[in-house]
Image (spheres, rainbow, N blue to C red):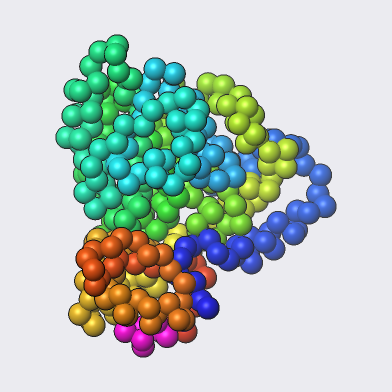
Amino acid sequence: MYSFKDDYSELGHEKLLNGLYELSKIQMDGYGLDSVSQEAKELIKKRFALTDADVHFISGGTQTNMILCNCALSPIEAAIAADTGHICVHECGTVEHNGNKILTAPNREGKLLPYSIEEVCNTHADEHMVHPKLVFISQATEKGTVYSKRELADLYDVCKKHGLYLYIDGARLGTALVSEGMDIKPEDMAQLCDAFYIGGTKNGSPLGEALCIINDNLKERFRYYLKQHGALLAKGALIGSFFKTLFTDDFYFELARYSNKTAQKLAKAFISKGYKLSSASSANMIFPILPNEKIAELQKSFKFHIWEKMDDSNTVIRLVCSWATAEDETNKMISML
């Protein structure tokens, strides 16, 4: 049974695995201080115009979010996120377990809006409440939508007004940046937030994310936080190797384009058959609204997430395409519509 559940079911692209094999017997420095990791960081800095940023390789997204929040927040400070935000829905309370509250606000198609940040700040105005200090968003969002350059700039303006860090979870940053109509270029990212990460796990890498820290206040002693949270890998070259391959000849964005192309092909097929989508996703996740009978039929051949019940007869499902999604399986699903 073929899976459209996520974009990390396949171990990783063979180019990355082959690149790792070539390094398997070469002695290198540990803890991310090896030459391969340094080459990968320079490639990332060049592609994203990160002249003064620090880049750290971390094994996964939950760990990356937890450590960045731990570094940015004191025990009396809190993060603000949309109520669909990954840190408050799908990360088993890691930020709260670490001692910081998450303040949620209603989402609009997965997005956090500037006035919501204002509202949270205005209602947390004295020492009887936690003090907001960081805003967390995802690009692309949990609903497959993407923030435009104007939307991000507006969020960042509000953050700067209230002395908040803006942190972007980039688990699917590649698919967001190459999505149709996107006006944000990689080199714009450093001007739109204080920190962001480039997701590898969901874009062809066996594991790994690249955290890019722009704000100087978040840089000092960050490697201590990595070590304390078990994220300073002795064999750091492992993730460095993957990102070196991903950012050689823009391979990272090539994989993301394929993911989007396949998902949008499915989206158009659903729409052409008269079905509606629950959000205007332009990335690699789509959310069709289907009769329960059609869902049961599709489940005989495919795996996917049941996302949200609309009414007694119709339900939203989530379909995710990846760099490796098979064209014949995509066509098979379309033929069953």
Q: Is residue 186 left or right of residue 209?
A: left
Stretch of the chain drawn in magenta:
329-337
Q: Is residue 293 left or right of residue 56?
A: left
Q: Is residue 245 visible?
A: no
Residue at 43% across, 69% down: 304
Residue at 67% across, 61% down: 17
Which of 86 and 68 lies nearest the eye of the viewer? Answer: 86
Which of 7 and 17 lies nearest the eye of the viewer? Answer: 7
Q: Main secondary structure of the magenta part?
A: helix
Which of 187 and 207 lies nearest the eye of the viewer? Answer: 207
Q: Is residue 171 left or right of residue 269?
A: right
Residue 60 inside the magenta-drawn segment: no
Residue 219: image location, x then y, percent: 50, 25
Residue at 23% across, 68% down: 312
Residue 4: image location, x then y, percent: 45, 70
Question: Which residue is at the far top?
Answer: 127
Question: Which residue is at the far bottom?
Answer: 335
